[in-house]
Image: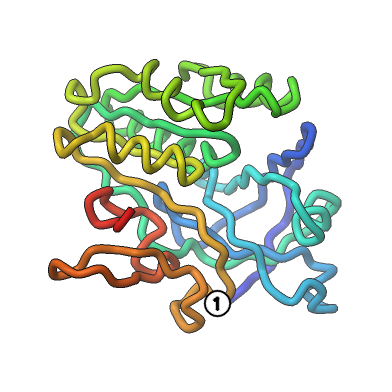
Amino acid sequence: MRLQRAEILSRERFGNHLLLRYRWNGCIPQPGQFVMVRTRSFAAALDPFLCRPFFVHDYDGESAALLVEIRGRGTSLLAGEEEEVVVSEPLGRGFDIGNGPVALVGGGVWVSPLKLLSRRLAGRGIPHELYLEIPSTAPEAYGDVISRIFPDADLVPTDDPERAPEKLLARVGDLSRYSAVCASGPLSTLAAVKRAACEQVCVQLAVRERMACANGSCHGCAVPVWDGGGRTYARACISGPVFLAEVLAW
């Protein structure tokens, strides 16, 4: 995995979330791909040792953006960086863009890859609709920023994490009216979307796993999949992070 320095163009922090945009003139990211990121400061000290994986949130031809939830030391350092990040090329397999109409379903900070997907669908004239969960535990600023980032989205406020997927899917309605559903969210949301589809529509799910090497060497991001009628494991960093729903052995 090759890392390169990239100039930070803007950063906006709202509550425990960060929207960071950096200059990018490398390979064009595809919706659903991810990058490995370090700040310039701990790239030298190797503290923390590992890069952090993030979905590519947006790309406009000159800059790329990340939508990050600040959870620990690595993301806290990233939120405080003002000049440069050290970032990889876009990695992994993203969403397969076909024909519309398409439903985009997301929950929490996992809505991140749906911005670039929505942009790409709009650019190709493919009709699509967005349904995004806004948890009650998120700060008010989070909902405000999400509504600005996704001005055409149907925002679904939820107050019970266990029932959030049910409420989100109730807003989506009959999935059979779509040619495809693309979802990115916590495991509970992805599993609920998979169950609701019931083989009536093509469903693609973006999984979020801990990653260390991002090249398949460490097997740290393995997810259960069906293969040849049996249950085995696939590495999300190279076989995903976007999978067809029927492939995942949940």
Q: Which residue type carries mark 1?
A: Cys
Residue 214's place in the image compared with 18, above or below, is below
Classify mark 1: residues with Cα within 10 Å, few (<14), some (14-19) or many (20+). Answer: some
51 vs 88, left or right, is right
* Residue 194: quadrant of the picture: top left
Which residue occupies the foreground of this view, 24 or 102?
A: 102
41 vs 103, left or right, is right
Q: What's the residue at 71%, 65% (across, down)?
A: 38
- Residue 199, position as x, y percentages in the image: 15, 39
- Residue 249, position as x, y percentages in the image: 29, 58
Instruction: Name the secondary structure under disc 1.
Output: loop
* Residue 176: quadrant of the picture: top left
Q: What's the residue at 35%, 20% (across, down)?
A: 172
Q: What's the residue at 33%, 33% (across, down)?
A: 121
Residue 71's place in the image compared with 212, above or below, is above
Image quadrant holding the N terminus, namely bottom right
Residue 59's place in the image compared with 103, above or below, is below
Which residue occupies the foreground of this view, 61 or 40?
A: 40
Q: What's the residue at 56%, 47% (across, down)?
A: 62
- Residue 5, position as x, y percentages in the image: 69, 67
The residue beneath circle 1 is 213
176 vs 232, left or right, is left
